[in-house]
Image: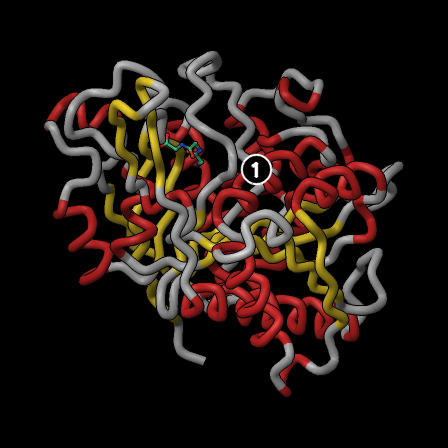
Amino acid sequence: MAARTLRIGLIPGDGIGREVIPAGRRILEALPSSFKLNFSFVNLDAGFGTFQETGVALPDKTVEILKKECDGALFGAVSSPTKNIPKGYSSPIVALRKRLDLYANVRPVKTVAGAHSPVDLVIVRENTEDLYVKQEETFMGPKGKTARAIKEITEYASLNIARMAGDIALRRQRVRDAGGDSIHKQPLVTITHKSNVLSQTDGLFRESARTALGEEKYQSLNVEEQIVDSMFYKLYLKPSHYDVVVAPNLYGDLLSDAAAALVGSLGLVPSANVGKNFAIGEPCHGSAPDIEGKGIANPIATIRSVGLMLEFMGEEKAAAKIYSAVDANLEEGKLLSPDLGGNAKTDEVVEDIIKRL
Ligand code: GGG
């Protein structure tokens, strides 16, 4: 088999993104030669820091290089301000997902073997619409100053995201059938929404997800629905129930951070922004300005995101190797970063994982 050469865009963004993305690069460079993968890298700008320097948060050049030169990418974190937002600033990661039509945000949350309360679920979040279309306005209404945002849900995006969830559920079942370790025996997709209140927007999401998951291809899947507020409740009460959860953008964003608490740290949870032909791996955590520059950021969310990116590039064996090296580090528990109660530096965790590759 000929070696495959993959060009990866590296977009550290802000804060600890600049510490964890180099860790992701080191993992790719350290993959054993038996996988026959070669990598080249291109560093790309985006973020609030980029906006402060250049007046643009997501330079066109970054998007062009991703489209024209890259096979995949890693994105670190962005720290958009929550107040005094400068005129012309808009979140670059939200824009990037839209400009590359990365319609799915895939977020696996899994405990390691022997956990007291095991969790093995994937949240499949729609990534391009809902309230994140960012059509907001502020005006003087009858009650005074009023702000309004549009929540947009399309049948097209809802069908796509539900099919992505269905495909992931089928793939997870194939891995289980081949002897993969999991707490689940049967595939289950949970559609979450609030169509009891938002009958048109979430109603369309629900109906489209039902249509997609009713297709012939997905007949072997169990499909259920859960109203999003009780979804949070049940997620905490019985997390082991959930296998694949499909959600509109906002609920998926909230649920995946909440689910991270079930496995001990946001620093462990990866994601991939996935389109038809492109994937960007991205740790779920933010830019963490409180620990920036201290060299103690947990690199595991990024390292697992490297694995996810490779999975969506068809390199499932290399991805599995990365996941098992991370699990071995966590199961041994000797070199853990401070968010997990240890005192290891980012580089020490990376080196320990590289040794296990
Ligand atoms: N890597 C995930 C991340 O950066 N999370 C923080 C986030 O979503 N920020 C959005 C923004 O600041 O624009």
Query: x, y (%) of residue 86?
Result: 19, 20
- Which quarter of the rendering shows the N terminus? bottom left
Colouring chosen for the image of the structure = secondary structure
User: In this view of the protein, can residue 295 be seen by the observer?
Assistant: yes
SS at mark 1?
helix
Q: Quadrant of residue 183?
A: bottom right
Q: Nearer the viewer, residue 249 or 315?
A: 249
Q: Is residue 47 above or below residue 67?
A: above
Q: Is residue 17 above or below residue 113?
A: above
Left or right relative to 229: residue 266: left
Q: Nearer the viewer, residue 90 or 54?
A: 90
What residue sits 59% from the left and 35% below the top?
257
Query: x, y (%) of residue 46?
Result: 24, 36
Query: x, y (%) of residue 227?
Result: 69, 49
In the rendered image, which residue does mark 1 sit on?
Answer: 254
Q: Quadrant of residue 328?
A: top right
Left or right relative to 68: residue 332: right
Number of residue marks: 1
Left or right relative to 175: residue 293: left
Query: x, y (%) of residue 266?
Result: 60, 31
Disc 1 residue type (three-letter): Leu
User: In this view of the protein, can residue 34 be seen by the observer?
Assistant: no
Q: Is residue 13 above or below residue 190?
A: above
